[in-house]
Image (cartoon, helix red, strand yellow):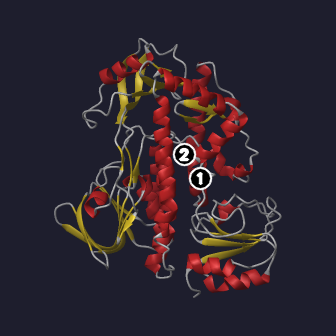
Amino acid sequence: MNRDVVISGGGPVGLMLACELRLAGVDVLVVERLPEPDQTIKAGSVNLTTAEAFYRRGLLPAMDAVVQRNFAQIQKFLESRGGGGPNAVPVGHFAGIMVTSGGVDFDDPAFRDVGPAARVVVIQQQDVEAILAARAAELGVEVRRGVELTGFDADDDGVTVRLGDQELVRAGWLVGCDGGRSRVRKLAGFEFPGTDPAITGRQALTELTGADALPAGWQHGTGGLYVHGPTPGRILTVEFDGPPEDRDAPITAQELEDSFRRVSGADVRVTQVHSATRFTDNARQASTYRLGRVLLAGDAAHVHSPFGGQGLNLGIGDAVNLGWKLGATIQGWAPDGLLDSYTTERHPIGEWVLEWTRAQVALMRSDVRTKALRQVVTDLLFTGDGATYLAKKLSGVLHRYPIDGEHDLTGRAAPDFAFADGTRLGERLHDGRALLLDLADDAGLRETAAGWAGRVNVLTAKCDSEPALTGVLVRPDGHIAWACEDGSTAGLEAALHEWFGAPA
């Protein structure tokens, strides 16, 4: 059996990557060792850039119903604790210091033209995975569950993948999306430097008694932190007693109850456990995301504590960056170095997330000096500038790729431009192709791009939200490769060559 790509790992990152590859016309096989989707409690939200990635592929309607249900549940829980209201909606936290939407300046230029993706925030990882699995099926992706990658042999021309005890699959490329303990990463020999864990975290969905008087949100207790909410029965604890002896041992109600009591001092009883997991602050990152015909994405490429909920976001960002570049390589039109730009662009963002989570762990400690520092940081985050800074960092709107260009939009994720016909940019990117926006009805611009037809769509439109812009080149992953305001096409042809190869 021959395939263009085999993806090891059928979680959200592997499924998103498979969908991107299918849009590029690539034959892809996803293998997942688990026979059914993992229902263990995981991420409960996504950031703006992840929501925009889903929006650009037409997945927003499927997510809206889930988001509205979750939001109503959270509002009800907050109101039961004396909170709630539109200004009490959390935008995120830093080291357990919660910032709500009421303190954020959403008129900041970084949030311009965010569009409807802004409403997709609170959605569980399992719901994201289910929606992506349905989309993958629509696109004809073969996903084989209960099938484990047991080994592979890579050469200059491809990879021979072993599935189970006997089956061999020959593929052009292998991508490890198989989590923090990635077998692909280990067998391929990727370096994975980083820092060892210092904490044990526990997160669970439970039935509780004695918790009615506890406040919602992050609380700093004796020797650690705890969270109650934002939905009934959801608890989280963090203790600075080193990593667990056996992270994979079953988590009992007694273990959760003991930990919650230690950090909260409350007489809480855990009567039932619906889902539970342990985590640490082990922080490591592959030194490169590609070795020959083998690539990594998601947790296979980087691991860190879950504080700030950046893991799912980081992995989806990897998938949409890699998908079109690997697809172009397989289709034969990728310019030199395009696939290597995956590491160049994504590695610094992964590095930032690791540093961001390490800093939070340092600020969570309960010694007297750290408490004093935490109060200073709290005061800063409760200012308008501080809250807006945190919101911008957590949302991902400050991330930009090192793309040459004079316009300040170059390298940024594209704003969701509003056009005069009532449509928006995100609606125009569903097919996974690049898009050149001709915003001044410029025949010269369209002529310049004609040689890349089939790789780059062209849209002539009037942009009501950014009337000064005359031309914008948007890559398939939604990042801007070229923009201008003076009607000149200078630099456009070079950008087309750099990202989309020689003209047909």
Q: Is residue 326 left or right of residue 432?
A: left
Q: Is residue 346 visible?
A: yes
The picture places residue 116, in percent across and down from the top left corner, at 68, 50
**Most extreme residue toward the bottom, as rendered?**
504
Q: Is residue 458 above or below residue 61?
A: below
Closer to us: 309 or 271? 309
Q: Is residue 356 left or right of residue 396?
A: left
User: Looking at the figure, which quarter contains the N terminus?
Assistant: bottom left
Amino acid under disc 2: Val
Q: Can you tell which mark lies on residue 301? A: none
Closer to us: 500 or 305? 305
The picture places residue 163, in percent across and down from the top left corner, at 23, 63
- Identify which residue is drawn at 49% across, 38% down: 359
- Identify which residue is drawn at 28% across, 36% down: 247
User: Looking at the figure, which quarter contains the C terminus?
Assistant: bottom right
Q: Helix, strand or loop at disc 2? A: loop
Q: In this view, does 163 lie to the left or right of 318?
A: left
Q: Helix, strand or loop at disc 1? A: helix
Which residue is under mark 1?
49
- Identify which residue is drawn at 56% across, 40% down: 122
The picture places residue 401, in percent across and down from the top left corner, at 58, 62
- Bin the neighbour count of mark 1 within 10 Å (Cα to Cα): few under 14, some 14-19, many 20 and up: many
- Bin the neighbour count of mark 2 within 10 Å (Cα to Cα): few under 14, some 14-19, many 20 and up: many
Amino acid under disc 1: Thr
Q: Are marks 1 and 2 in contact (CB under 8 Å)?
A: no
Q: Can you tell which mark lies on residue 46? A: 2
Q: Residue 476's image quarter?
A: bottom right
- Identify which residue is drawn at 28% across, 63% down: 188
